[in-house]
């Protein structure tokens, strides 16, 4: 799980770095095309039957929601530091509570609403409206967190009927299918850019997909070896990795209040996720935990 968080933090940092050099459409397409190709080879070697989805509509909708989160993330990372952006996206478990009450009409306890308020307060500490730190750009990680929360609710409702590897394959395939015509019809000269790009940029494009695919595979492997309740707190190591890698690459680190806000978000998010897991265990339902949407 920790290695998975490191992969996702590296993916976000690579996205921010490459965003100044290449079009975002090309970066997104590379992230999902590599993901689909790697999983196709994986399933081809381990079991061809896993290409068949039990619920194709679920897979396509899930993939589209994740692509929406990624698109918002790729754009938002061009305007915000990686650590602060990551912390706001980590509001996802808290926002799942809101969507569960609104969409699924689930009863929400006072403790859960307190965690929602605490998580939002942490985001406000990071953002500090009126400070001029990030401006309108903060809407992107917030929107990405909401899209990811919808993705979580959908996965929780239907994911238990699918193989995790099959779901991971359709994650890449759906994104690639949606993005390919967009890239081909783009006004940007993609072919010319790729032909002129140095080897380093081409390698980083490959790294985008590799980090995303490895992150999700490591996540699946960890969930196969330990309980979700045990692993969930380690998801929030992504905030620390994002701060570390962001400092190494950009020599940028959060200020004091940024760290305070990120700590509040991590505590409220982890507590909210733990409550989700405990309640589902009481109902004896399997849990599909994928709180990272890169």
Image (spheres, rainbow, N blue to C red):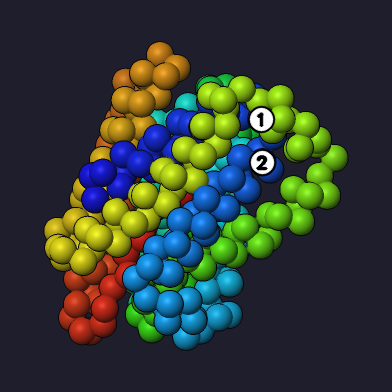
Residue 187 percent across, percent down from the top left: 85, 40
Labels in figure, total: 2
Q: On the picture, is 59 further left or further right than 274?
A: right
- Mark 2 Cα within 10 Å, few/some/many (few <14, many 20+)? many
As drawn, the residue found furthest toward the top would be: 251
Residue 132 at x, y percent in the picture: 57, 22
Q: Quadrant of residue 242?
A: top left
Identify the residue at image location x=48%, y=64%: 40
Residue at (83%, 49%) from the top-left corner?
Answer: 185
Q: CA distance from mark 2 to mark 1?
A: 7 Å
Tell me the SS state at disc 1.
loop
Please give left or right for residue 153 compared with residue 283 in the image.
right
Q: Which residue is mark 1?
A: 22
Position in image of residue 219 (x %, y %): 30, 56
Would you say 227 lies left or right of 160 here?
left
Q: What label does residue 26 carry, if any?
A: 2
């Amino acid at each position: 799980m920790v290695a998975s968080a490191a992969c996702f933090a590296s993916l976000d940092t690579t996205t921010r770095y490459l965003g100044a050099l290449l079009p975002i459409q090309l970066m997104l397409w590379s992230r999902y095309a590599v993901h689909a190709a790697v999983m196709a080879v994986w399933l081809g070697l381990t079991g061809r039957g896993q290409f068949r989805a039990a619920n194709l509509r679920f897979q396509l909708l899930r993939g589209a929601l994740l692509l929406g989160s990624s698109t918002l993330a790729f754009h938002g990372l061009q305007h915000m530091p990686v650590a602060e952006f990551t912390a706001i996206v980590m509001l996802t478990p808290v926002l799942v509570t809101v969507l569960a009450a609104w969409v699924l009409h689930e009863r929400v306890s006072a403790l859960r609403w307190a965690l929602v308020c605490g998580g939002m307060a942490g985001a406000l500490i990071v953002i500090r409206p009126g400070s001029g730190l990030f401006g309108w750009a903060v809407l992107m990680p917030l929107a990405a967190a909401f899209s990811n929360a919808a993705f979580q609710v959908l996965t929780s409702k239907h994911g238990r009927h699918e193989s995790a590897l099959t779901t991971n394959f359709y994650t890449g395939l759906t994104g690639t299918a949606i993005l390919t015509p967009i890239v081909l019809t783009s006004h940007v000269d993609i072919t010319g850019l790729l032909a002129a790009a140095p080897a380093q940029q081409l390698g980083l494009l490959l790294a985008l997909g590799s980090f995303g695919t490895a992150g999700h595979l490591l996540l699946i492997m960890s969930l196969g070896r330990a309980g979700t309740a045990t692993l969930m707190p380690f998801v929030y190591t992504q905030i620390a990795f994002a701060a570390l890698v962001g400092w190494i690459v950009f020599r940028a680190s959060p200020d004091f209040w940024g760290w305070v806000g990120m700590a509040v978000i991590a505590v409220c998010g982890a507590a909210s996720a733990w409550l989700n897991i405990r309640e589902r265990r009481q109902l004896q339902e399997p849990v599909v935990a994928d709180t990272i949407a890169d």
